[in-house]
Image: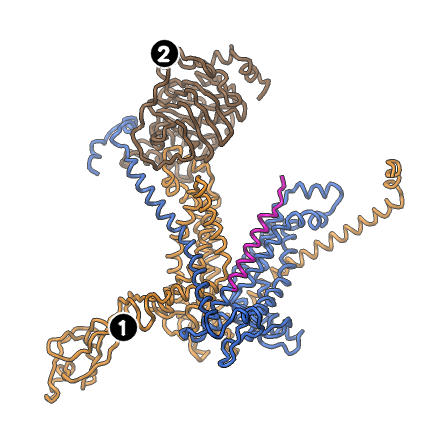
Chain colours: A orange, B brown, C blue
Amino acid sequence: MTPAAHTVVLLDPARLARARRSVAARHKRERAFQWFCVVVASACVVMLGAIVVGILAAGIGSVTRTFLTAPPSPEPAEAGFYPAIMGSVWLLVLVAAVTLPLGVAAAIILEEYKPRRRLSRLAHGFIETNITNLAGVPSVVYGIVGLTAFVSMFGLFGNELNPALETGAGYYDQFYNEADQVILVPVAGPDAPETVPRAGMRALNAEKRPLAANIIGPDDPWPDDPAVAARTLRSTDFSGRISERTVFYLRLPLGRGLLAGALTLSLVILPIVIITSQEALRAVPNSLRDAALGLGATRRRVVFRVTLPAALPGIMTGAILAMSRAIGEAAPLLMIAGIVFITFPPGNLMDDFTAMPLQIYNWAQRPQQEFHELAAAGIVVLLGVLLVFNGAAIVIRQRFQGRGS
Amino acid sequence: MLIGERRNVSSPVEESRPAARGTAAQPPEPGRLGGPGASPPAPAEPAAIRARGFNAWYGEFHALRDINIDVAENRITALIGPSGCGKSTMLRWINRMNDTIATAHAGGELAMHEVDVLSRQTDVVDLRRRVGIVFQKPNPFPKTIYQNVAFGARLHLRLTRPEVDALVEWSLRKAALWEEVKDRLHKSALGLSGGQQQRLCIARAIAVGPEVLLMDEPCSALDPRSTAAIEELMLELRESYTIVIVTHNMQQASRVSDATGFFYNGALVEVGPTARIFQNPARKETEDYITGRFG
Amino acid sequence: MTGRDAFLGQPPQAILADPRRLRSHRRQRVVDRTVVGALGAAATLSVLVTAAILFVLGTETVRFFRQDEVSLGEFFGSARWSPLLGSEKHFGIWPLVCGTALVAGIALLVAVPLGLVTAIFLSEYAPPRVRATLKPALEVLAGIPTVVYGFLALVLVTPGLRLVFDGLGSYNAISAGIAVGVLIVPIISSVSEDAMRAVPQALRDGVYGVGGTRFDAAVKVVFPAALSGIVSAVLLAAARAIGETMIVALAAGSTPKVTLDPTEEVQTMTGFMVQMALGDVSNFGVEYFSMYAVAAMLFALTMGFTLLGAHVRRRFREAYE
């Protein structure tokens, strides 16, 4: 078309009238879409509200004193959440102790010691990509890896019945004498020869206090004095071997215990700590590092005296959020611990354990309505704890927001 | 000695060795050096900083070409020139701040007092103790005023608490900041105004006991009143330190400096006493820049 | 503090000039090197973790395929998965993969529209106050433990859906799918929103300048420009949905079958792994190893989606300058 023809087209009154009408239609579409967006976005908020309200309604009634302090039981009315709460606390402490130092250390070297040489740069990039990929691995895969790596430890240390290493356990031969008193004789280990009662041997009473054992022959008369009788043994009496685990009990392989669970959970949480700590370090402006370098600080001192203190609020926020993720994780613990009927909180690192999300799962997957109410109550407690954690993170973020230059 | 990418701070350290003496029999007169190739005449006093045939690169980019300059002891030397001419690069090589840039390397001769700055054996940490630097934008640490000033001193020296106290007060007085902050030493340094923060950075640099003070456009982020305060401070500090200042502000250079070097496109076009450079420039480029024909 | 007495009473200038006070740099460098070594060890640990994952999954999967009852052909060819059926064990992976795909598919069907529209809203329309409420709400949604979602799927979604699907079983794919979908909405919305906000305002101004509305700008310019980020968001969300365990363990069921009917009970790969782990693990029979084979498959799938998402992000990122 010739230029003149173009102009004719553009100024054609019929077309202009159509254009004006379509503008109105487009405005309508715009407004409709805007409302659509608002509805959808509010749907998210509404869903959140529904979840919270629903859970509270279902569960808050059951969060009684008994619930919080009692162990679980087959009777819903008496079941409690206490061992699960304590298990979660133990796990939290252990996971924090493992992931925070390792994670912050890794973040420091990845962020503050970026290499110049090409080969080192490749290694650095590889490690960073690796960590990002690890963050995306499903937690249940970590669970199954933990099963081999921590629970059975590749079979390198024997198995649970024949552990390669055991410390912190006391083994005793337990005698019940004719006066029905318990007399314990400490023995070296599970394979020590059975104790034959003889004079002068080391003996303890039921409260583990030393006592002087009075050994008499198989045909000797039983002493009349009850005090003496209480510590009398016949030389032909036989004993049963018992073991008692102290708080310091450790065993290799770790078995399906607390430490194995904590280490597996640490695998899940470690990439998160590394990534958030890296971001916190990255947020520290370079001008601070330059200032410290200009004063004659080596890189290490710049990091530990200037960069790390400046990044600390961000690192703490990240750590808290990572820990709140740890509290809510159930999949890896399901693989490690399974569903065990626990009535006591864990007493040592090798003990069976449960955690809040595990107990909730346990109750939720039962068909009875009462257990569902218990599950809801457990969720209320869990969400309450998470609320405290996230609140702390927000407070830290607000408080230190203005401090950084 | 060329510094390539294999320069490593943790390599074995020896005492700062005397710089390799160049062709000059005696140290040249301050400010009398011209561009490349000029032979230096005999000077009145030794130079605090000396560059001979100094070149600097960022990767392939040749940022500074054959620089010959003497910076006189206890004088203020200004480096001026348009953006990108290399003056900041020059400044930052004096205390090896460019080590933080992976692609930066340099060659030729650069000496600070008896220290061969470019040598791989030079203890960079000690060099930076002896050469302080103040940056364009004030960058106090997010710590208290006291901690800021004490930071550098504590890095290098063994001090008792009363000695640190005395040092902090002395530095703040020298930086003309003591009266304003003496009642809030243990409050955050970030609560100070821009001009105060910059004086704090100066106090922080002084507290380490340097011989040379480098200032990279120290007033460009400040208001006129703070600028005037800092310029006055510079003139006072001249008695104790050799000062090298990079500035965009020609009036500032003519106000405070004793010698001025004009950089253009990586070359040191002209250097000499400030009065002469500004009133009677020898080169046309210098005159064009000073009269504002390009910026 | 011996020797310090010699220093007492010096004026500051003398303090600064006294060479006896200088700390040894040699000792500092030793500390520097030790510290760097320790930090480096911590970072290398992460490589060890990946190695451990690959090693464990690899060796146990190999042991699985070495068992008599198992063959590669059956694993990839059969549609029957019945490892616990005493006499007739079958190890075809497809029922589990199908279950996972069904649940993840429903989840994406729910989450992609919700997430994208929310992202467009946050990026193009929402005033700052609304953003300040909505973004934290989404963060909270993302932080709710998955066991809670699973519980809700069981006690809220399934009964609710019974009104629509008469006679819906207690375990079904659609409830789990919806719950997983709600779980991954924040992933899609936040990553997509980041991608959309990265589009420079100048592009939108160009649309307004010729008389376009916000809708025109959002749908015809911003969305296509941010497409690589959006696709990557969907891929990441898909990876998350595939790997989700607690929701499906509670709500989807434990009957592996190949089906596209969402109202049926299914079993996902993750659901199977949980089922095995809760059983008698010390048996070390072929069922035990099948758990690892499934885990290896799961790992491969999620890693594939994650890597693809990262690759798409990098390769097709718009250069705006």
Q: Is residue A185 left or right of residue B155?
A: left
Q: Main secondary structure of the magenta part?
A: helix
Name the chain under label 2: B
- Residue at (49% x, 65% y) in the render: C295
Q: Amino acid at mark 2?
A: Ala
Residue C116 location, x and y as percent?
64, 55
Q: Quadrant of residue A91?
A: bottom left
**Position of A212 relative to A89 (above/below):** below
Q: Residue at x 43, y 74 (%)?
A: C285
Q: Secondary structure at mark 1?
A: strand
Pick the quarter of the image with the C terminus of chain C.
top right
Is residue A61 shown to the viewer in this render?
A: no
Instruction: Give a yes or no on whether discs 1 and 2 share a subunit.
Output: no
- A383 drawn magenta: no
In this view of the protein, can residue C43 be seen by the observer? yes
Q: Quadrant of the N terminus of chain C?
A: top left
The Cα–Cα distance between marks 1 and 2, rounded to whole angstroms, is: 89 Å
User: Disc 2 on helix, strand or loop?
Assistant: loop
Residue neighbourhood size for the residue with mark 1, other residues' Cα within 10 Å, grouped as few (<14), some (14–19), many (≥20): few
Looking at numbered disc 1 in the image, what kind of residue is underneath it?
A: Glu
The disc label shown at residue B44, or none: 2
Q: Nearer the viewer, residue C201 or A156?
A: A156
Residue C80, horizontal then vertical, whole percent = 56, 75
Say left or right for B41 vs C307: left
> Magenta region: which residues?
C297-321
Q: Which mark is residue A244?
A: 1
